[in-house]
Image (cartoon, rainbow, N blue to C red):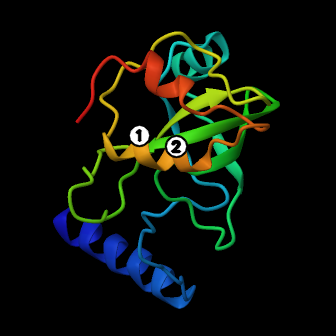
Amino acid sequence: MILNSIIKRTAITSNILKCNFHVSNTCSEIQKLTRLRVVDNSPIGMQAMAEGKPPKCIHVYNKTGVGRIGDKVLVAIKGEKKKGILVGLKQNQKPKVPKFDSNNIVLIDDNGSPLGTRIHVPVPTILRTILKEKTHSKGADYTKILGIATRFV
């Protein structure tokens, strides 16, 4: 009985080794097809997270294509395209910027105002300066996101 199970295990592992699987390291940066977590109370975000179908990043609006904190991203959520702002990341950050357990976004509409009315997680204080720099007089006003945040880290 024990000998049969050992023979089966070795046969399975030898078949797996013949397939030449390529395994890459996990990537902790925001790029295309990265799963994100909606942290505001927008109806579409709450419904998607409750169903276990988190949004995926389609596009990062910067030159490098790698999302940093405060960057605008385009996400696919519930079969729709929505824009969002990254408010917390897993990747290693600059000094005095906290590292989070998940990649968090706040959904926004086209003019930059958030879809929800409250953010459930702490928001880094460095986001204040980042969003003020990205806000233009004629363009979107991203500082409204700071107004609905309940806690800062």
Query: Mark 2 to mark 1: distance in Å?
Result: 6 Å
Residue 94 figure quarter: bottom left
Q: Quadrant of the C terminus?
A: top left
Tag 2 residue: 131
Q: Classify 10 Å Cα crowding around label 2: few (below 14), some (14-19), many (20 and above).
A: many
Q: Amino acid at mark 2?
A: Leu
**Nearer to me, 95 or 18:** 95
- Tag 2, which secondary structure? helix
Image point 60% across, 14% down: which residue?
A: 42
Above or below, comparing residue 17 to residue 78 in the picture: below
Image point 45% across, 26% down: which residue?
A: 146
Image point 53% across, 82% down: which residue?
A: 21
Residue 4 figure quarter: bottom left
Above or below, comparing residue 4 to residue 106 in the picture: below
Above or below, comparing residue 49 to residue 37 in the picture: above
Residue 88 figure quarter: top left
Q: Which mark is residue 128?
A: 1
**Nearer to me, 68 or 112:** 112
Q: Are marks 2 and 1 in contact (CB under 8 Å)?
A: yes
Q: Amino acid at mark 1?
A: Arg
**Nearer to me, 134 or 93:** 134
Q: Which mark is residue 56?
A: none
